[in-house]
Image (cartoon, rainbow, N blue to C red):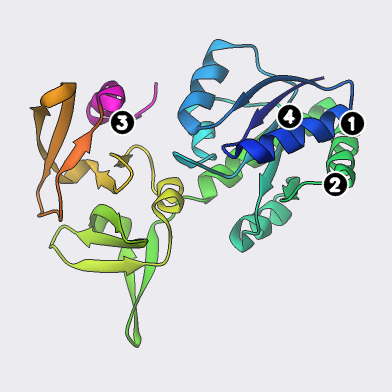
Amino acid sequence: MKALIIEDETAAARNLAAILRQTAPGVEIVATLESVEESVEWLRSNPHPDLLFMDIHLADGDSFRIFDAVEITAPVIFTTAYDQYALEAFKVNSIDYLLKPLNASDVGRALAKLHRLTSVERSDYGSRVRTLAASRREDVFLVHVRDKIIPLHRDRIAYCYTSNEKVTAYGFDGAAYPLDKTLEALQGLLPEAEFFRANRQFIVARQAVKEIAVWFGSRLTLHLTVETPERIVISKARVPEFKAWLKSLHPVE
């Protein structure tokens, strides 16, 4: 059995690999990947493995974004620190997961469960994962402001910004809405066709992009239809992806 590990924490990836060598010597680890972008590229360029171990939260966003870009039919075992929303969703959809820190008994149990799946059940498993990935997109966020709860529809969001570990969504009217989610979590909840992770501090809405300027070092700067607290810079490496996203209904093709 060939397995792919998608995990951005080096220690966690090494721990999982060691557990697999100990408990399942017949499992061959074909690669260890650290990001959504790297995983999409690898899965498009290589034969798919028989099994994937996938951390939910990666450095460049929610790993469910991988399913938006690549059709994965192999079983997936998700790994995560405690995430109530994710765990409830996994249970409802009968999808296997492992809580960090991983241990040999839990990994062995998950592998034994997968070995018992028939070919039809494996196909259905992939379908359930894709359904779960789609269900994680959110249309409305609840914003707590003093003693009020304000529903904020994603269509009203021009951009999201993080500073000093605080995340704020800004509307097209310039209004600020404090959010209790990280930018990485938001990236997984907002549809890729409508929102782009510009850099570590900004997620921008397609409808908010007013103009783009070429900046030094082959980078780009974005000017939105609303004011931003600082310049939005797209790195040279991400320029092609941004351009593809901007002119296409599907950012990753």
Q: Is residue 96 above or below residue 87?
A: above
- Of mark 1 and mark 4, the one earlier in the sequence is 1
Which element is circle 1 on?
A: helix
Horizontal and vertical percent position of residue 63: 54, 39
Which callout, 1 or 4, points to the residue nearer the camera?
Answer: 1
Instruction: Give the distance between the C-alpha atoms of the residues marked 1 and 3, in whole angstroms.
Output: 45 Å
Region in magenta? 236-253
| Picture disc at residue 249 | 3
The residue type indicated by label 3 comes to: Leu
Which callout, 2 or 3, points to the residue nearer the camera?
Answer: 2
Q: Quadrant of the C terminus?
A: top left
Write the residue at 27% across / 55% down.
161
Residue, disc 1: 22
Report crowding for label 3: few under 14, some 14 to 19, many 20 or more residues within 10 A (C-alpha): few
Horizontal and vertical percent position of residue 37: 46, 28
Horizontal and vertical percent position of residue 224: 12, 46
| Picture disc at residue 198 | none
Asked if the residue under mark 1 is in contact with the one under mark 2, i.e. CB atoms within 8 Å, the reply is no
Which element is circle 3 on?
A: loop
Q: Which of the 4 quarters of the picture holds residue 22?
A: top right
Q: Which of the 4 quarters of the picture holds residue 18?
A: top right
The residue type indicated by label 1 comes to: Gln
Write the residue at 57% across / 19% down.
43
Residue 39 is inside the magenta segment: no
| Picture disc at residue 106 | 2
